[in-house]
Amino acid sequence: MTLSVRVIPCLDVANGRVVKGVNFQNLRDAGDPVELARRYYEQGADELTFLDVTATVDNRSTTYDVVRATAEQVFIPLTVGGGIRSVEDVSRLQANGADKVGINSAAIARPALIAEIADRFGSQVLVLSLDVKRSERTESGFVVTTHGGRTETDLDALAWARTAIGLGAGELLVNSMDADGTRQGFDLELITLMRELSTVPLIASGGAGRLEHFPPAITAGADAVLAASVFHSGELTIGDVKRELANAGMLVR
């Protein structure tokens, strides 16, 4: 069965406000997360991703009250990431309205966390968030970063994705740090390489700027496309992107 392409707006949240920058730097205010969540739900978003981008850096948990208020406005799957370090964190997020959780830094620090979450809640709940940069230090040419892109690890991005899937990750959110916020298009090479190894759904993130950027990401192997600033600014709507994908011959909801 052919699955519909999903269009997912992303709310990068810091201190209770949606923020956006370029390459995760120089974050600027982009609005109220609850208001934006309601807008995207009404526009026909298939899912919503909520990332507390400073939770790990500040060594704190995700802002649960903001998650709860957001979840009350949308009746589509809500993925929440940022500051998740234990199965207890996942349980609490679910109690506050999250359907799925995204983990990155904590999984790298302790890979067993992936298996613990998958075993208790099911792989479908677990999204591995990969903030990836190009690097000559790794075999694939791509390295994983943590702490909102601030810290570069020694992990080859492709090898880590393969390991995480083996441990129970049910989906990959692949964000190109090089393309993030640039609006120059998705990193198609990165998407293609991840698709070749992945046995789970793949979400492409980082670089969307124009309507014509979205269909190539799907052609390269993504099951879903995620964007932030082009939606926050009102330059594009969820409907605009779905029409562009449909016009390219892709199945949308």
Image: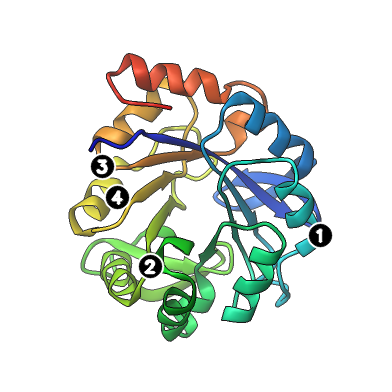
Which residue position holds label 2?
Answer: 169
Q: Residue at x 48, y 83 (%)?
A: 109
Which residue position holds label 1?
Answer: 65
Locate residue 190, reporting x and y percent: 29, 50
- Residue 35 in view (yes/no): yes
Q: Residue at x 23, y 58 (%)?
A: 199
User: CA separation, marks 3 and 4?
Assistant: 10 Å
Kind of residue at disc 4:
Leu
Looking at the image, tell me whether mark 4 or mark 1 is earlier in sequence order. 1
Locate residue 121, reporting x and y percent: 49, 72
Query: Image quadrant of residue 132?
Result: bottom left
Proximity of marks 3 and 4: CB atoms separated by less than 8 Å:
no
Which residue position holds label 4?
Answer: 190
What secondary structure is found at the residue carrying circle 4? helix
Q: Residues within 10 Å of mark 3 (few under 14, many from 20)?
A: many
User: CA separation, marks 1 and 2?
Assistant: 26 Å
Kind of residue at disc 1:
Asp
Which residue position holds label 3?
Answer: 221
